[in-house]
């Protein structure tokens, strides 16, 4: 009897593990007709794309259009001015899974999805930042475009407010291993009322910082900063 009970318990435990594995893998299962990130990356510009991904950050809403950073476990996406009401925009909280149908476009090197529509799906996922410090200055960096990333041990070269005064974007130059890179505090993503805007505005040349942000692209990497730590 003890042997039978032990066998039952072992089988139950094994089935539980299998069930957990299935639940985990389901987060990456794509619906019919939905592209993998590799398929999306390979798609030609100006062609229709269909993806499923998770809202990571909301940049702005106006005139029934919202701009978002999305991510799945394969890559990141920037969805520009996707049609949505203000009520729908408010429902698209961090981690929400959505299906997006739109057109792949590029502006100044930034690959994005335009003229998009969406539907909310079951599922939730919030990405952890990937450390891309060692990818700076390499051709590999662009493969992580639009993902949440961290860059460590950066030296502050300069900060400058767009239009010369607080309230607008902050242009930040940070260097690593002797090379300088452009970063930005995007006021529509992290505006003057946020802690990161204040913290970046207080930086001075020569300080060493770790920064986190979304790997946006504008004539080269131009990460939109969402967090900064002074070392």
Image (cartoon, helix red, strand yellow):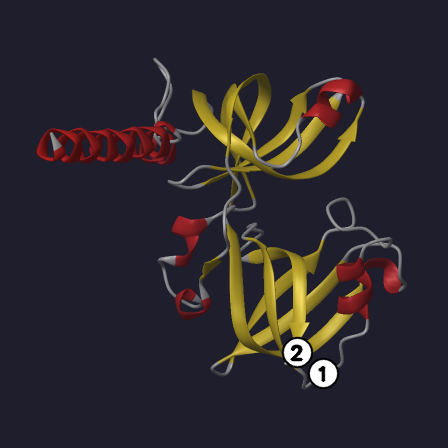
Q: Quadrant of residue 174?
A: bottom right
Name the foreground residue: 168 vs 128.
Answer: 128
Seen from this angle, which residue lies furthest bottom? 206
Crowding at dot 2, Cα within 10 Å, few <14 / some 14-19 / many 20+, comes out as: many
CA separation in Å, label 2 and label 1? 5 Å
Kindly identify which residue carries mark 2. 156
Residue 205 drawn above or below residue 160: below
Residue occupying the point 45% across, 25% down: 52
Kindly identify which residue carries mark 1. 205
Position of the N terminus, as image quadrant, is top left
Name the foreground residue: 185 vs 55.
Answer: 55
Residue occupying the point 38% across, 30% down: 40
Determine if residue 174 is in view.
Answer: yes
Q: Pointers 2 and 1 in contact (CB under 8 A)?
A: yes
Badge number at residue 150: none
Whole-percent x, y for residue 75 in the image: 42, 41
**Disc 2, SS:** strand
Name the foreground residue: 144 vs 19.
Answer: 19
Q: Quadrant of residue 198?
A: bottom right
| Residue 206 relative to residue 219: left or right | right
Seen from this angle, which residue lies furthest front? 1
**Disc 1, SS:** loop
Whole-percent x, y for residue 118 in the image: 57, 17
Residue occupying the point 63% across, 62% down: 183
Q: How many marks?
A: 2
């Amino acid at each position: 009897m003890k042997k039978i009970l032990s066998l039952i318990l072992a089988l139950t435990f094994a089935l539980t593990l299998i069930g957990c594995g299935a639940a985990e893998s389901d987060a990456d299962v794509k619906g019919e007709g939905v592209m993998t990130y590799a398929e999306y990356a390979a798609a030609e510009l100006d062609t229709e794309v269909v993806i499923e991904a998770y809202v990571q950050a909301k940049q702005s809403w106006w005139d029934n259009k919202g701009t978002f950073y999305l991510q799945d476990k394969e890559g990141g996406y920037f969805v520009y001015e996707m049609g949505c009401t203000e009520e729908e925009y408010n429902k698209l909280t961090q981690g929400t899974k959505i299906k997006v149908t739109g057109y792949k476009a590029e502006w100044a090197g930034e690959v994005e999805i335009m003229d998009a529509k969406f539907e909310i799906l079951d599922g939730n996922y919030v990405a952890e930042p990937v450390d891309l410090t060692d990818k700076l200055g390499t051709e590999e960096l662009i493969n992580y475009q639009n993902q949440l990333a961290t860059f460590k041990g950066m030296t502050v070269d300069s900060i400058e407010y767009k239009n010369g005064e607080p309230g607008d974007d902050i242009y930040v130059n940070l260097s690593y291993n002797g090379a300088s890179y452009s970063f930005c505090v995007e006021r529509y993503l992290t505006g003057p009322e946020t802690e990161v805007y204040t913290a970046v505005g207080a930086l001075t040349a020569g300080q060493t910082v770790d920064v986190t942000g979304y790997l946006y692209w504008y004539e080269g990497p131009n990460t939109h900063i969402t967090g900064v730590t002074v070392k």
